[in-house]
Image: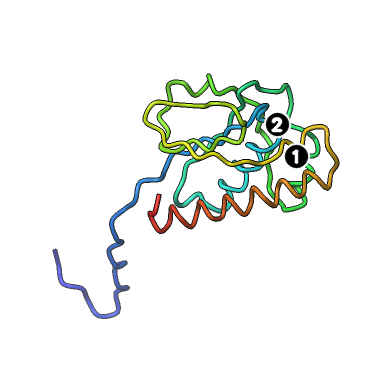
Amino acid sequence: MRPQQAGEPQPPAPAGPERRKQRVLFVCIGNSCRSQMAEALARTYGSDVMEVHSAGVSPATIISPLTRKVLGEKRLNIDGQFPKGVDQFARVRFDLIVNMSGMPVAMEGARILEWSIPDPIGRTEDVYRTVESQIEALVMRLILELRASTI
């Protein structure tokens, strides 16, 4: 290694130990509302600590238009997203499953968190906003816990 010459930029300081991103799967019933909201929020605000996906135990055919609207109001883009079933992830290893479906969900090796969030499907736009706010608070707490490595 040659000595640094005067006027040369300083090399970047070595980073601390690289932390592996946690693989997180958000699950609800249809993967049309709650899990899509959680995935969008986690992807936007927590991409430094997690790799996120979402699925439903009984996937819907479309993402609810009110889900898209409420997320759009927060400038969260879910273009290209679509409802997926949990079975599509059977061969993927997750560190954490966040279950909002109210039904039993298990994947080998994954820790399960149960979030009791009401399903907004078929409800008013205001209910969607309330649900999104509840999910946002929980996702932000999860991100902070992962950053502090308390999970």
In the displayed structure, would residue 144 be above or below residue 124?
Answer: below
**Image quarter hosting the N terminus:** bottom left
In the displayed structure, would residue 144 be above or below residue 78?
Answer: below
Q: Earlier in the sequence, mark 2 or mark 1?
A: 2
Residue 12 as seen in the image, left or right of residue 46 = left
Which residue is tagged 1? 67
Amino acid residing under circle 2: Ser
Q: Which residue is drawn at 53% across and 20% down?
A: 88
**Which residue is nearer to you in this view: 97 or 9?**
97
- Crowd tier of the residue under label 2, counting other residues whose Cα lies within 10 Å: few below 14, some 14–19, many 20 or above: many
Residue 105: give x, y in percent of width and height.
Answer: 52, 27
Which residue is tagged 2? 32
**Which residue is nearer to you in this view: 67 or 120?**
120
Marks 2/1 in contact by CB < 8 Å: the verdict is: yes
Determine which of the numbered discs, if any, sits on residue 31 in the image: none
Q: What element carries label 2?
A: loop
Q: Which residue is drawn at 39% across and 26% down?
A: 108
Residue 95 as seen in the image, left or right of residue 84 = left
